[in-house]
Image (cartoon, rainbow, N blue to C red):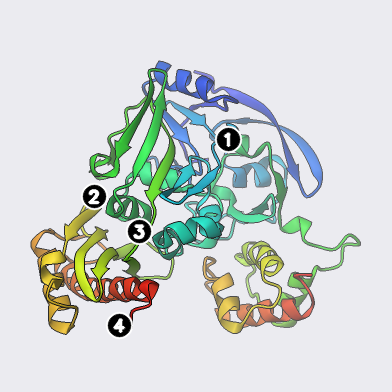
């Protein structure tokens, strides 16, 4: 049996893409394999690790827990969409650089998207709120101290404004 | 790509969705997908068709009336948690929802979906069961209401028929002289709890006239125990301990990878004491009575 394919459009970082996918294509795989946007990383693929987190209509969601065909009506933002218009680092990215908030970088795209939305909702987080903001994302090498510092530095840089 | 192949349908009307379910016995409803997609990716489930209800109109509403909160099938956990009216009419919603996974999951996962997924380890089924709420379900044959007491029939098994969609869940509001509380213990922040307790206490003055608690992750289905008898003579260290023992007399804690049955029993004791005491204090605070 030939698997049924769906012709869809995804709206990612302000660009509209046409793609043809089976219903079971995870959104994370569509971004990486069909659109070549490999900044979104895939870790556990069951919603635990947070590496694949993207913004769906501005809200962080796990792209591995959505199907591409189900994302057609949404505006998607991946880590590729977080840099400023001139290509320079966005404030959350800049804060990660300054605070050594990454080592291997595998988990970083999920942290950047999560924190971007988190600071938009809460531009001046307390230390406890900064920790809570990244509680749903796993990092296995940097450790969380510098990531939490990066959240607070990004707030200073005005990421939420 | 790990899920097994399935036919995918994204209907624009409820009627279209219901007809697809009626015509395909192996079809499953996709709403938030935060429980379903992992099951598909791990191939623990392989339905022949997914009926994606995310494009249906009008199912995202959260309707607040004095007697309760009605949550539409597409209302995300985050939207319910952010709804001040919902939290005011039934404060247990806010207290329990902030224990549901992480905010990122709550942005996509739906409250009604979590209920009809009927996971004995989930928070919202226990909350609906404690409050004696109900779900409204639709099929091509019409609509019916299923009380929470008849909804959870086994592990991950609700009493919905394969051709039915749960269109809303209704949580009765907090009434005068009632207080509520919720707490759970998990290995890791945001993980499934090894034991969770929701409690509802009604008082006259300081006197407890009714006390019930719902237990999640203790048995395969959310279980409610009436604790009034243990607390009728007052709320103190001894009566709260007695309430924990009374609860255990009605529960058979399961053992799994995460916790032994004995450890779960200990969590039932500890959380019963903690949560019932908090619900009692909540009831007194709402009436302006000093504890």
Neighbourhood count class around disc 3 (C-alpha, 10 Å): few under 14, some 14–19, many 20 upward: some
The structure residue drawn at horizontal position 78% and vertical position 50%, both measured from the top left corner, is A13
Relative image position of residue B230 (x, y in whole percent)? 11, 70
Return the x and y of residue B221 as percentages of the image width and height.
24, 50
Q: Are marks 2 and 1 on the same chain?
A: yes
In contact (CB < 8 Å): disc 3 and disc 4 = no
Image-quadrant location for residue A66: top right
Residue topped by disc 4: B291
Q: Are marks 1 and 3 in contact (CB under 8 Å)?
A: no
Q: Earlier in the sequence, mark 2 or mark 1?
A: 1
Q: CA distance from mark 4 to mark 1?
A: 44 Å
Lower sequence index among marks 3 and 2: 3
Do marks 3 and 4 share a subunit? yes
Q: Are marks 3 and 2 on the same chain?
A: yes
Q: Label 3 marks which chain's residue? A: B
Can the viewer see residue B240?
yes
Which of the two marks, 3 or 2, is nearer to us in this view? 3
């Amino acid at each position: 049996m030939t698997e049924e394919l769906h012709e869809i459009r995804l709206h990612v970082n302000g660009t509209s893409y046409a793609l043809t996918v089976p219903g079971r294509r995870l959104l994370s795989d569509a971004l990486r394999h069909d659109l070549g946007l490999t900044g979104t990383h895939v870790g556990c693929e069951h919603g635990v690790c947070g590496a694949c987190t993207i913004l769906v209509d501005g809200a962080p969601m796990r792209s591995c827990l959505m199907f591409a065909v189900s994302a057609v009506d949404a505006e998607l933002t991946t880590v590729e969409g977080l840099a400023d218009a001139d290509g320079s680092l966005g404030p959350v990215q800049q804060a990660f650089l300054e605070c050594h908030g990454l080592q291997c970088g595998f988990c970083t795209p999920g942290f950047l998207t999560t924190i971007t939305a988190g600071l938009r909702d809460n531009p001046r987080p307390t230390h406890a709120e900064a920790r809570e903001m990244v509680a749903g994302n796993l990092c296995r090498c940097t450790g969380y101290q510098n990531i939490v510092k990066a959240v607070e530095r990004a707030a200073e840089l005005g990421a939420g404004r | 790509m790990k899920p097994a192949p399935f036919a995918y349908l994204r209907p624009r009307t409820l009627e279209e969705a219901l007809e697809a379910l009626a015509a395909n016995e192996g079809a499953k409803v996709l709403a938030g997908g935060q429980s379903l997609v992992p099951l598909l990716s791990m191939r623990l489930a392989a339905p022949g068709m997914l009926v994606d209800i995310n494009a249906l109109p009008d199912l995202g509403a959260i309707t607040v009336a004095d007697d309760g909160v009605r949550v539409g099938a597409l209302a995300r956990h985050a939207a319910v948690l952010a709804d001040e009216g919902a939290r005011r009419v039934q404060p247990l919603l806010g207290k329990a929802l902030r224990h549901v996974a992480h905010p990122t999951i709550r942005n996509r996962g739906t409250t009604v979906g979590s209920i009809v997924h009927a996971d004995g380890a989930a928070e919202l089924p226990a909350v609906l069961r404690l409050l004696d709420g109900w779900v409204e379900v639709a099929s091509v044959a019409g609509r019916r209401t299923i009380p929470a007491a008849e909804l959870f029939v086994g592990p991950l098994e609700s009493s919905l028929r394969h051709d039915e969609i749960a269109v809303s869940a209704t949580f009765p509001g907090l009434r005068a002289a009632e207080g509520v509380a919720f707490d759970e213990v998990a290995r890791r922040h945001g993980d499934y709890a090894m034991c969770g307790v929701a409690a509802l206490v009604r008082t006259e003055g300081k006197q407890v006239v009714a006390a019930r608690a719902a237990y999640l992750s203790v048995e395969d289905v959310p279980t409610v125990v009436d604790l009034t008898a243990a607390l009728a003579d007052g709320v103190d260290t001894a009566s709260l301990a007695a309430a924990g023992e009374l609860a255990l007399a009605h529960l058979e804690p399961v053992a799994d990878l995460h916790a032994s049955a004995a450890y779960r029993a200990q969590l039932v004791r500890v959380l019963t004491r903690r949560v019932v005491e908090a619900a009692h204090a909540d009831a007194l605070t709402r009436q302006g009575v000093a504890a």
